[in-house]
Each structure stands twice: as structure tokens, then as C-alpha cells.
Amino acid sequence: MPAPAAGGGRAKAGGTFSFSNLRFILVLLIICGFASVVFLMSPAHGGASSPPLRAARGSRWSAQATVHGQTEDAEADDDEDDYEEGVGAGQETPRSRQQRPAALPVVVVAGRAMPKGQDLPAPPAAPLLSMDVRLAQGKLIFLFMLQDGLPHADLWKAFFAGAPRSSFRAFAHCSKPEPCRKSKAFAELGIELVRSVPSKWCSDLVSPSWQLLDTALRADEGGSKGAPQKFVLVSDSTLPVQTMPRMRQVLLKTDHSDLCISPRNEWAAVSIFGITYSIVKHHQWAVLNREDAEAFAKAWPMLSSYSSHVKNGVLDLAAGDYKWNLPRMGPDGKANLSATIARSLIPAPGRCPDEEAFTSLIFGLHEGGIDAMWQNIIDRSVCRTYVNWNCKNPPEVFSKMTDKLRELMRDTSEKAYLFARKFKKDASLKELKAFHQKASSEPV
């Protein structure tokens, strides 16, 4: 019998196979099986969702992902909301420039991409309600993110005075809950305290926002039978520069959310197989309608894992430790929670989750082919909380009334700022308090 050839030999007479042929068939079956699984698991084909990006170092199928966008500093980032609540609060240091990684290896992009140039359907039209009905039935829900109390409680009393209790509701999250429980100001103003959750500046201030929104939504699960509602996020260094009647007129006039969207050069982005995925950056202090508030409240616990990094009641993460996923925009213009990209795969040193969570979890990532829908959202961008970063030691901290604050109080435009920050706890604001007292004493 001749010796077998190198590599496993040839097939013997009678139809038996050599080892090399058997190995070839096994490899072919494995490849076909893997391709079938990938096809069936794709969200576009109704399969279970899987993370659309997976690292594949050393794989022949790897592709380079080029990072876009500029590094940020305090001057370029007018949205560096160093929100006071949580560990590390009050550290007014500019976010330092860091070197971004040049490339990122990826292997699979799951989820269905919209064809380039295809317009997404416009959102459904809101029910037509007269302004009288909106004011009579509409409600503002104020969501305070605090540390250990409500600064300038007397000014807030003047702001809320005269407003019917049915026209507003207020909730507060305190990073130090015990002093808040002992404070009489919350009971006097009817502010309801929500359960405190661990938070840390620039690591996770989204979870306290979620706690507030989720509690407020559950408190009125019927949605006031279709009456307009706006959920207003407020920090402890923020004060109203428009009166309550004026604020209701402005916010209840429309059904959309008021998001303050940053310029495109501040969006973190990554290119994968020729498609650029961008995180649409926004200011933290937003006003959400009920639909968007519900979308965010649903998505955050599904796509984040920050609660699993709490040790002894403290969040054990540093700034830049991203523990959440970003959904892509679906064909309806809303976030597709079954097609996501890990936030850690889009480098953006110094970026805080609270500057990205609302746009990402309500609408999804920006990418090619869906510009028309995103442009509609961007066109509606409105900044409702004033903060000045163009000063010697940004942000500006108000210790008394200034000409700029008086200018904000006189602004009657539709896109007027409704709030301003940052105010010192001992700021002298008799003029602003009198402004609200006068409004509350006038007939509505």
C-alpha cells in the first residue's frame, strides 16, 4: 500500500475520505452556520438584538474606524454643565485636552441602516388645542436636582405663589437626602422628594434625572388625559428669570421638547465602513414633553449598567467610564433600542453622559441618510437655561443682580431664556424676588 501523501493523502478507493477532505468540509459547514446565525440575529430580520459593534483585533475582517470631532476645552464647550449634585461637584476645572485614539477595530454593524438620502417620516401631528385649553389643562412638572436643600427657597415661593396647584407639580432629588427631609421648604412648596440614587459629576448624573422623570411619570400615569405636560429639569444653582404665567405661556404653546443642541463640531463621532455615527450633544438642563420623557425613562435602565458599579452607596467610576449603549435612529425617527453601539467605542475625552443621554435615547445616533429628520429636530433647538462661559473665570457665578439678568427678565421672545445659572447661595436678589412677587399678585 503506497504511503499517504503529505497533508493527509488522497481519498482511498471505495469512496472513503481522507482527513484533509473531511477537515475542508467541516470548515465549510462552520462558515455557513456562522453566516446563517449572523443573518438571523440581525434586527433587520427579526432576530434577537446583539451589540452592533464588536472588537476584533487581529481579524482579517477588521475595519478601521476613524474618529471625528475636535478635542474640547472650556472655551469650545459652552455646555460644560458641571452640575452641582454628586461627588466631585463644584470642581470648576476645564476639561483637559487629551489625545484621541486614531482608530478603532470593529467587525459587525448590526441594525438596518437607512438608504442614503432617504427621508424619514415626519412625526405625527399633535392634537389641535386652543391656547385657552392648553393653559387651563396643561401642567409644568419641575424636577429639581439638588445637594442638601433648595437654595433661595423664598424666591421660589414668590415664583410659585398665585399659581393654581393643578397647574404644576414639583419633585426633587437630593444627593444628601437627610437634610432635605428635615427642610420645611419642600413641604411649604409642595415639592415631593424622590428616592436618592448614587451619582457623580461627569460620571453619572443621568440616573438622578431618570429617577426624577420616572417618579413624575408614574405619579400621573394617565398623562392628564392628553393635556400638554412639560418636564423641566432645574439645578440647585438655577433660578427663574421669567414669571410663572409667562413660563406657562411659552412652554405650553407647543407640544415638542425644548432641547439645547450644541454645534456639530462638538459632536463625538466615529466612522465605520464609510458610515459616520455621531452623538448629538446637548445641554443638560432640558424641557421634555411627556412622549420624550417616557422614551428616555424606558431606555435608560435598558441600555445602562451604572447601578452595577455602586459600592457601599458610592458610584465606583471615573469620568469617561462609559457604561451605556447608544441606539441608532429607527425608520420612525425614534431611537431603535434593539440596534445599539457601545458608548465606549466612540472616543470623546471629557464628555459627560448628561450631555448626550436625551438626544441619544429619544432619537438615536445621527448617521448618513437621515439628515432630514435630524434637521427638523435641530431646527427646533431652544436653550431655556442661560449660563455664561464667555467670561474670565467661566462659568459666571452671579452674586447680585446684573444688567444681563435684567435683560433676560425683559425678554418676551418665543425663544427667551426662562432660567439662569449659576447663582451663589448667598446672592443678593431682592429685585428678582420682587419681580416674581409682583407677577404672582396680578390676575392671571
Image (spheres, rainbow, N blue to C red):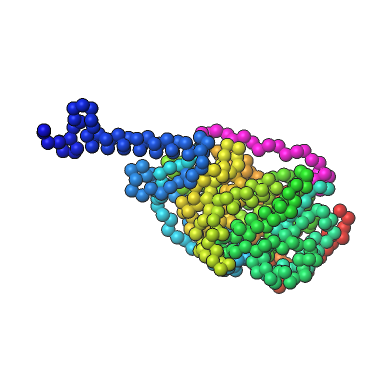
Image quadrant in which the N terminus is located? top left
Would residue 70 appear left or right of 361 to someone viewing this image?
A: left
Pick the front one: 341 or 242: 341
**Is residue 125 one of those drawn in magenta?**
yes
Residue farthest left in this picture: 2
The answer to whether residue 252 shows anywhere in this view is yes
Residue farthest top in this picture: 14
Q: Which residues are magenta?
A: 114-135
Residue drawn at point x = 55 percent, y = 54 percent: 304
Residue 65's place in the image compared with 144, above or below, is above
Residue drawn at point x = 72 percent, y = 69 percent: 181
Residue 10: x percent and y percent? 18, 32
State which quadrant residue 212 falls in. Answer: bottom right
Pick the front one: 325 or 94: 325
Pick the front one: 298 or 238: 298
Residue 342: x percent and y percent? 49, 50
**Is residue 165 one of those drawn in magenta?**
no
The answer to whether residue 277 shows anywhere in this view is no
Residue drawn at point x = 17 percent, y = 35 percent: 9
Magenta region, main secondary structure = loop
Would residue 4 appear left or right of 121 to someone viewing this image?
A: left
Pick the front one: 158 or 215: 215
